[in-house]
Image: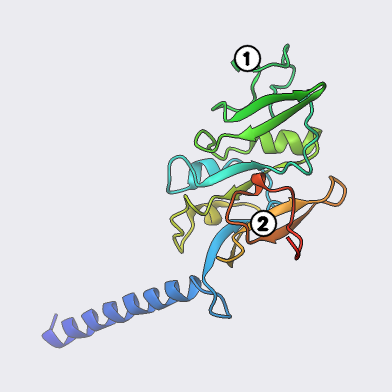
Amino acid sequence: MSEGHGIDRRDFMRGAAAAAFVGGAYAAVGDKGEEMVWQLDPNKCTQCGRCSTHCVLNPSAVKCMNQFNICGYCDLCFGYLQPGSRGRDTGAENELCPTAAIKRTYIEDPYYEYVIEEEKCIGCAKCVKACLVFGNASFYLQIRQDICINCNECSIAKACPSDSFKRVPKLQPYIYLTGDVSTTKSQPSSDPNPPQTTLGPRSENS
């Protein structure tokens, strides 16, 4: 190969790298120049389980949330208990979650509160699916922005069979649920705290 051809090839590689950098930088901002981050639309999610296996982080940056204004605080919680479990208590043999990431707390008869311990959650969506089929659909998945490394080429987004992942403004990084089970819809949230710590969308006056 001649020196001239070698220089041309190096120039081509540099140009390709520059184009990739510009493309990645453009993907990190929206059409309006806003900084963007990845998020999962819970209304499109099919609870396939790939969020737990395709994230570059281990455990995954995708975590389960429980939105309390939808939760029924059920004694018989299908997101918490194994199907056909003999007991409705905190025995490990009764829990559906493979990592015991759901904390069950007695409130008053017959109500219990269910809080996700995120350091244990792997984003497998088993509880989300069970709550959706048999409960109030208050469990759902979100990318925790304080854990996500925000790579422009999200490996979970590529593997998602339902095209649930999309770029959202960094100032509104969460898509969470509101309303009852018949009117549930996703809403953007600018709340920096996990959606499970809120009681629904904040009003303009709050």
For image coordinates 63% across by 38% down, the residue present is: 125
Residue 180 as seen in the image, left or right of residue 168? right
Does residue 33 sit above or below 191 in this rendering?
below
Q: Tell me the residue that label 2 is attached to.
A: 175
Could you tell me which quadrant the N terminus lies in?
A: bottom left
Foreground of the two, 155 or 174: 174
Q: For mark 1, give the secondary structure.
A: loop
- Residue type at tag 1: Gly
For image coordinates 58% across by 79% down, the residue present is: 31
Could you tell me which quadrant the C terminus lies in?
A: bottom right
The answer to whether residue 43 shows anywhere in this view is no
Q: Position of residue 129 (x, y in %)?
A: 71, 37
Q: Position of residue 97 (x, y in %)?
A: 61, 28
Does residue 59 sit above or below 171 in this rendering?
above
Numbered mark located on residue 91 in the image? 1
Q: Position of residue 182 (x, y in %)?
A: 87, 48
Foreground of the two, 93 or 46: 93
Does residue 88 sit above or below 169 in this rendering?
above
